[in-house]
Image (cartoon, helix red, strand yellow):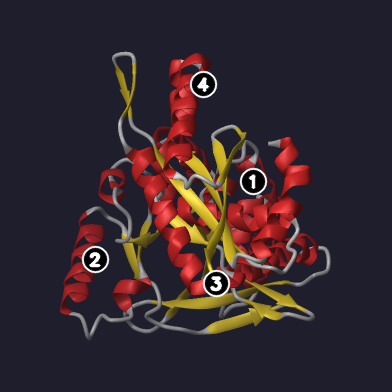
Amino acid sequence: MDAWYSNGWGRRSACARGRGFGALLLVDLDGFKYVNDSLGHEVGDELLQAMARRVESASREHDLVARIGGDEFLVLAEGLGVTLEEASQQAERLAKRLLISLGEPCWLGERRHLLSGSIGITLLGDDDSKVEECLQQAEMAMYQAKQAGRNTLRFFDPVMQAVVVRRAILEAELRQAERHQQLRLHYQIQVDAQERVTGVEALLRWQHPELGMVPPYEFIPIAEASQLIVSIGRWVLDTACRQLASWAQMKHTAELTMAVNISPLQFQQPDFIDTLESILTATGANPQRLKLELTETLFMAEPDAVCRTMMRIKALGVRFSLDDFGTGFSSLSYLNRLPLDQLKIDQSFVRTLFEDSANAVISASIIDLGRNLGLEVIAEGSRVGHIVTG
């Protein structure tokens, strides 16, 4: 493998120039880690050898096959076609043969094992691409296959590369956003049945000096994946509580409540309760007018631990709202266990409330359910209005 990586790539790429397009396929085994961890490395090594033989047998005779470590294999296939379309079709056929072969049951002694593969493909031409770039492209495509549900294949797309580059840029810039005072909170009003404003929801916005207003759907997932959401969430809580305390001094805003979204990662921090309590003390915000909005994903792993944390926070006077209700799988099983105060109907039901009779029935059922459980119910997206503060 080392010889091919350092010396052979150039020679084989030179050959490919006269034979049209080729492809590099990165094969990652799905489920191998579980076998290796549960049955031991000896069984894992045997399984890897069996999978390696399958990769080799499914490849063409003149293809170069290599294991690059762990449970990943590379297949360098040349001469797939004189056009990109022909080469992509041939590469797809090769990848599908690999998937079928890897998916067949594998017997080691009397034990039957079932694995599959995720395959990333990048096409090779005569552009003298560096080996590192080609491997990176195949890896990105492989991860796309993983995210698509595994046991499938994906081609590298320049658009995919652009997305990755933009994501890297945004993450680097986001690390400086709080220090450079680029983060903003917008406040969306919440009204009751009589159209009276009862509170607001704090919405995080990022005003970049060059990129402009970066959409939340772009930077929030990056903040979550990079764990920046913990420090950013702390800033959001502090800023929202300061605003809540400021409004408490004015007659027409003194009764408003403040809803703040809390990410699962932020909530699960060991010092979250201490941080929340210190923010409430430092800002002078009334905890009874603060609502923490949680999503159902938080309860999926350790509901009992989450419930205990919620009870400690409830003791401070803070209230809870279950966000995006109606879109998850297990919300009903949590309703009678968690110290919730409010259900928030997801906007996907509300936006088509008058056009889709099914959504109207679902929304009405949620309202009845909330009332019967003694919970408030609020519909997300039924009214739009922002009070913006720096």
Q: Amino acid at mark 4?
A: Asp
User: Which of the 4 image quadrants contains residue 100?
Assistant: top left
* Nearest to N terminus: mark 2 or mark 3: 3
Q: Name which residue lies at 22% across and 85% down.
A: 355
Closer to the chain start, of discs 4 and 2, is: 4
**Cα gap from disc 4 to disc 3, whole angstroms:** 39 Å
Question: In the image, what residue type sits under mark 2?
Answer: Ile
Question: Distance of mark 4 from mark 1, alpha carbons?
Answer: 52 Å
The x, y position of residue 323, in whole percent, is 41, 60
- Count of marks placed on residues: 4
Location of residue 38 (image quadrant): top left
Mark whose residue sits in front, 4 or 1: 4
Q: Secondary structure at mark 1?
A: helix
Give the foreground label among 3 and 1: 3
Residue matched to label 1: 277
Given this view, does label 4 or label 3 mark the residue nearer the observer? 3
Residue 286, above or below 50: below
Of the residues shown, which amino acid type is indicated by label 1? Glu
- Which element carries disc 3, helix, strand or loop? loop
Residue 37 visible to the viewer? no
Q: Is residue 113 left or right of residue 68?
A: left
Measured as percent of width and height from the top left, residue 371 is found at: 23, 60
What is the CA distance from the residue labelled 3 to the residue labelled 1?
67 Å
Q: Alpha-carbon neighbours of circle 4 within 10 Å: few (<14), some, or many (≥20)?
A: some
Q: Nearer the viewer, residue 374 or 305?
A: 305
Q: Amino acid at mark 3?
A: Val
Q: Which mark is residue 82?
A: 3
Q: Residue at label 2?
A: 367
